[in-house]
């Protein structure tokens, strides 16, 4: 069956631009997570949704980062006024419920010039 | 502050031998641990997990050992195969009812290379 998909796979932005990264979770999965993976590091938690409710946004690094999941399915991570330190791979994961196995998408590699 | 650490950036092993990947954690509240495997240009894939009520969990060629007093876990792969070559991440979380609470804290990863 279809796994988690993310688009675009690669994004190059000029410093100061806004970007939007999309995640399509596995159909029927209630839980959705966003992680940020800097080069040479492990993924770091950004935020968590249960259906359309954002239950944990403790990992968002600044108020320039905003995530939504309005209908409890597709999610979008938006970064406003991008900075060079935002360059990373952004990973989305979904699971059937909060404690179940998380299935990761391939990630979006964001490069901010 | 790195709460989950994988101190070996890389490991090289001969095919058929054992691979041992290590992970240490500092947060004593963590009570659920996982290993993920990652190939280039793909997302991490779940391998195996262990709850703190156990000290060992086995799944085929993969065994995870947990030493709570030392705050240390390890992943053993026996026998190692060239297709096991990938980046391995350990991760930790709080648990609820014996399963992960969801929010994962990852180590930096260890690159495993298995030579034919």
Image (cartoon, helix red, strand yellow):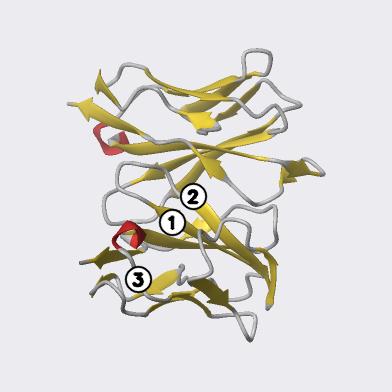
Q: Chain of mark 1?
A: A
Secondary-structure class at tag 1: strand
Q: Chain of mark 3?
A: A
Counting the numbered discs, the total is 3
Along the line of sight, the residue nearer the viewer: A66 or B62: A66
State left or right for residue B24 relative to residue A5: right
Number of residues whose C-alpha sits closer than 10 Å to that of mark 1, classed few (under 14), some (14–19) or many (20 or more): many
Number of residues whose C-alpha sits closer than 10 Å to that of mark 2, classed few (under 14), some (14–19) or many (20 or more): many
What numbered label is drawn on residue A82? 3
| Residue, disc 2 | A44
In this rendering, is residue A1 above or below A58? below
Q: Nearer the viewer, mark 1 or mark 3?
A: 3
Q: Residue at x 62, y 85 (%)?
A: A70
Number of residues whose C-alpha sits closer than 10 Å to that of mark 3, classed few (under 14), some (14–19) or many (20 or more): many
Q: Quadrant of residue B96?
A: top right
Secondary-structure class at tag 2: strand
Tell me where residue B2 appears, x and y as whole percent: 50, 33
Along the line of sight, the residue nearer the viewer: A42 or A97: A42
Image marks 1 and 2: residues in contact by CB distance under 8 Å: yes
Secondary-structure class at tag 3: loop
The lab-note entry on whether marks 1 and 3 share a chain reads: yes
Q: Chain of mark 2?
A: A
In this rendering, is residue B107 above or below A90? above
Residue lying farthest to the bottom in this orientation: A71
Q: Residue at x 54, y 53 (%)?
A: A45
| Residue, disc 1 | A36
């Amino acid at each position: 069956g279809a796994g988690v998909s993310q688009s675009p796979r690669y994004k190059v932005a000029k410093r100061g631009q806004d970007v939007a990264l999309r995640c399509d979770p596995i159909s029927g999965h209630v839980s959705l997570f966003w992680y940020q993976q800097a080069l040479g590091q492990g993924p770091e938690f950004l935020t968590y949704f249960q259906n359309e409710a954002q239950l944990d946004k403790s990992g968002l690094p600044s108020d320039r980062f905003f995530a939504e999941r309005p209908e409890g399915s597709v999610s979008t991570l938006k970064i406003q006024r991008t900075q060079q330190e935002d360059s990373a791979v952004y990973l989305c994961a979904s699971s059937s419920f909060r404690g179940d196995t998380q299935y990761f998408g391939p990630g979006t590699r964001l490069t901010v010039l | 502050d790195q709460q989950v650490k994988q101190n070996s950036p890389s490991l090289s092993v001969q095919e058929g031998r054992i691979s041992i990947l290590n992970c240490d954690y500092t947060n004593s509240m963590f009570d659920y641990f996982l290993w993920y495997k990652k190939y280039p240009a793909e997302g991490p894939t779940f391998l195996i997990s262990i709850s703190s009520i156990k000290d060992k969990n086995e799944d085929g060629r993969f065994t995870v050992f947990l030493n709570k007093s030392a705050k240390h876990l390890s992943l053993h792969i026996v026998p190692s195969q060239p297709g096991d070559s990938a980046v391995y991440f350990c991760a930790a979380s709080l648990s609820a009812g014996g399963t992960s609470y969801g929010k994962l804290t990852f180590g930096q990863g260890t690159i495993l290379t298995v030579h034919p």
